[in-house]
Amino acid sequence: MKVLIIEDDKDAARYLQKSFSEVGYVADIASDGETGFNMAEHGQYDLWIVDRMLPLRDGLSVIAGLRNKGLKTPALILSALGEVDDRVTGLRAGGDDYLTKPYAFSELLARAEVLQRRGNHAEVQTTYRVADLILDRLTHTAKRNGVEIMLQPREFRLLEYLMRHAGQVVTRTMLLENVWEYHFDPQTNVIDVHISRLRSKIEKGFDTPLLHTIRGTGYMLKAATDIADQA
């Protein structure tokens, strides 16, 4: 999930960004309503999280303006104003949910995931399987032959992307753009390091290799023995 956080409280915004990152999601920050409006209008996001009281342009005006432009991305409003009338006003302005401050991130995350599911018109695939390796997006777990594999957030995103493209060659550029959100080559060995760690976690102690290096091209996740791979 890619989230836009429109919040002028820098500490609160960074807390949300860090918390989303820890569960494997990407979050951008806008610190005022005008910047948030422009980022939401021109960016590709699965969810907007919008503080109600913002400089330059208030949160309800941001959402209403985006709705007027035909944008249907789910919007979660955050506000210290929690009376019934306040919530009704927020929802009528185009918000899809309304959460009163202070809040627990676990609740915000659950609401965000519900909104994302509602916003997807096509059925969302939540489980991926390659041979005896299973990844569950809802429980954020990965298991092989019934044994849970402990993954860091970036490793989970990497494995999810590889499993979504199982049987296909995934290039380094594809990984940089879709797992790290880089649109340039940072000239580091970050991919090699993560691939090596992931390969160790999903293959150590198991007989069948799954993560193959396709020489000069990229990687492929597949249960096969006839792929020319290089460790």
Image: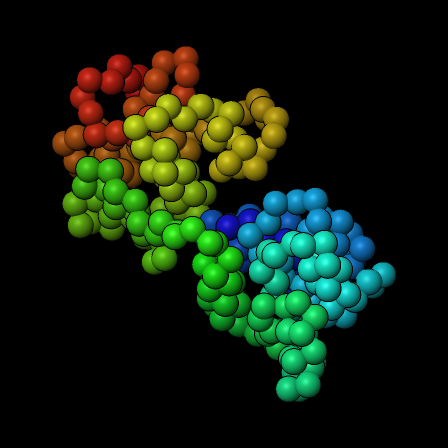
Q: List x then y, in percent, for residue 105.
A: 52, 67
Q: Nearer the viewer, residue 72 or 201?
A: 72
- Quadrant position of residue 182: top right
Q: Is residue 202 above or below residue 32?
A: above
Total numbered badges shown on the rendered structure: 0
Q: Is residue 187 left or right of residue 65?
A: left
Q: Is residue 200 above or below residue 24?
A: above
Q: List x then y, in percent, for residue 98.
A: 60, 73
Q: Residue at x 36, y 49 (%)?
A: 125
Q: Nearer the viewer, residue 1 or 41?
A: 41
Q: List x then y, in percent, for residue 76.
A: 60, 66
Return the residue found at the far right: 56
- Quadrant position of residue 228: top left
Display coloring: rainbow
Q: List x then y, in percent, for residue 58.
A: 79, 66
- Quadrant position of residue 184: top right
Q: Residue at x 67, y 63 (%)?
A: 50
Q: Is residue 171 left or right of residue 46?
A: left
Q: Residue at x 64, y 49 (%)?
A: 28
Q: Residue at x 38, y 42 (%)?
A: 160
Mark yes or no: residue 214 visible: yes
